[in-house]
Image: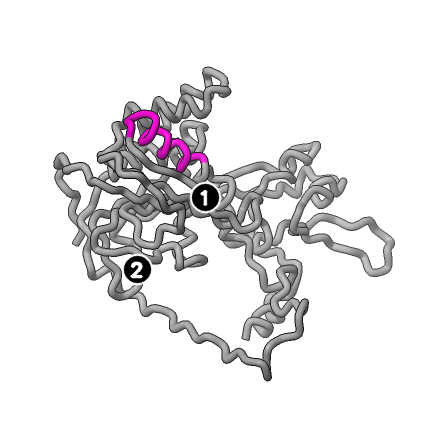
Amino acid sequence: MWKIMKQQKEQPRKNVSVRLEAIGGQGANSAGKILAEAAVLGLGYSGNHFSSFGSEKKGTPVKSFVRFSTEGKQIRTASYIKNPDVLIVFHESLLETHPDCLEGITAHTDLLINSTKKPSEIRFPEGFKVRKFATIDATDLALKYQCGLNSIMLGAATRFCPEIDAEILLKSFLKFFSHLEPQLKKRNIEGFESGRKQTKDFIFDESQANIQPHEKILPSMGWENAPLGGVILNPGNTVLKDNSASRKGLLPRFIAEICYNCGFCDMVCPDFCFVWKVDPQNKTAPALMGIDYQYCKGCQKCVLACPVQALVTVPESEFLESEKQHHLFPQTEIQKLKR
């Protein structure tokens, strides 16, 4: 059973470490900078911030790290934060696609997840424990207020960082984005406030930690079976790749009735997601059938390129399975390759 925690004034911690787990393009790097600036420049704490990227592009996993000391103790390390006091996950899909995002959580960690699910619906590996836990549908709120996802998540983060005053954090946010137009600033302020007000802490129930952890089997590697230098054992450009975890809750919807097969969408698509019907005898021109959403990372470049609005951006939650029926490769062959 999950119970809402009574809001009690907490004693500020002497040293605080925050790790933000996100997908490139969601603003986790900016959120980490703003959080650190509020602590250091706004409140006079000592601290630092840095981020870790894979390939620096939209859609790839991003980790952002913030450390600060309320006593002014010098922060001399800029290493990976393994055991955070606060963990903020910007998209619930990371729990499945990148389970290492929960690494180092202890019974003293506060956890915030951007999710459409209620806390009672989230499942964790066996033995998992946290101090406080909350979910917020930040994606829906960002669409509602037409603001950045990091605005919502920063507002929600104030519930887990009592050491940083919400007003000071908002000032740091507006200073960081001082180049925004007044209307955009207003939207982001509204998003920040909605995140702060709609996030509620829940008492973590250990019965939710009931997933069997995956056993990691390391390969036996030595001089006899080491691969030749320069050999790519796991090419990224294969039918097995799945970009669905890169999306931020939005997808391009294809409206076949108004499409005239110009092909502009296919020209700008970085992952060749579009499925075409090709006449083997070349008597008719290729016709666009749909999108293979396994390879679509939701960049929306095709939506901008379409001259007749045959592609529109919609929330992924509104998609039906029947709309995802088109595939570049036969699914039976993909399943064989996976085995």
* Image coords of residue 278 (percent x, y): 78, 55
Q: Is residue 13 magenta?
A: no
Between 213 and 224, the residue placed more toward the observer is 224
**Which corner quadrant holds the N terminus?**
bottom left
Question: For the residue marked with disc 2, what is the amino acid?
Answer: Phe
- By secondary structure, the bulk of the magenta-drawn segment is best described as helix
The colouring scheme, among rainbow, by chain, secondary structure or one colour, is: one colour
User: Residue 237, can we see it?
Assistant: yes
Q: CA distance from mark 2 to mark 1?
A: 26 Å
Q: Is residue 283 above or below residue 314?
A: below
Nearer mark to the viewer, of 2 and 1: 1
Identity of the amino acid at label 1? Ser
Magenta span:
30-44
> Residue beneath label 1, please?
51
Q: Residue furthest top?
A: 182
236 left or right of 88 in image: right
- Determine whether, in the image, residue 308 is placed left or right of residue 42: right
Residue 104 appears at what percent x and percent y?
31, 57
The tally of labels here is 2
Q: Is residue 244 left or right of residue 175?
A: right
* x 46%, y 15%: residue: 182
**Label 1 element class:** strand
**Residue found at x 32% / y 69%:** 212
Q: Secondary structure at mark 2?
A: strand
Can you identify the residue that label 2 sits on? 124
Q: Quadrant of residue 106?
A: bottom left
Q: In this view of the protein, which residue sits in the foreground, 116 or 131? A: 131
Residue drawn at point x = 44 percent, y = 47 percent: 63
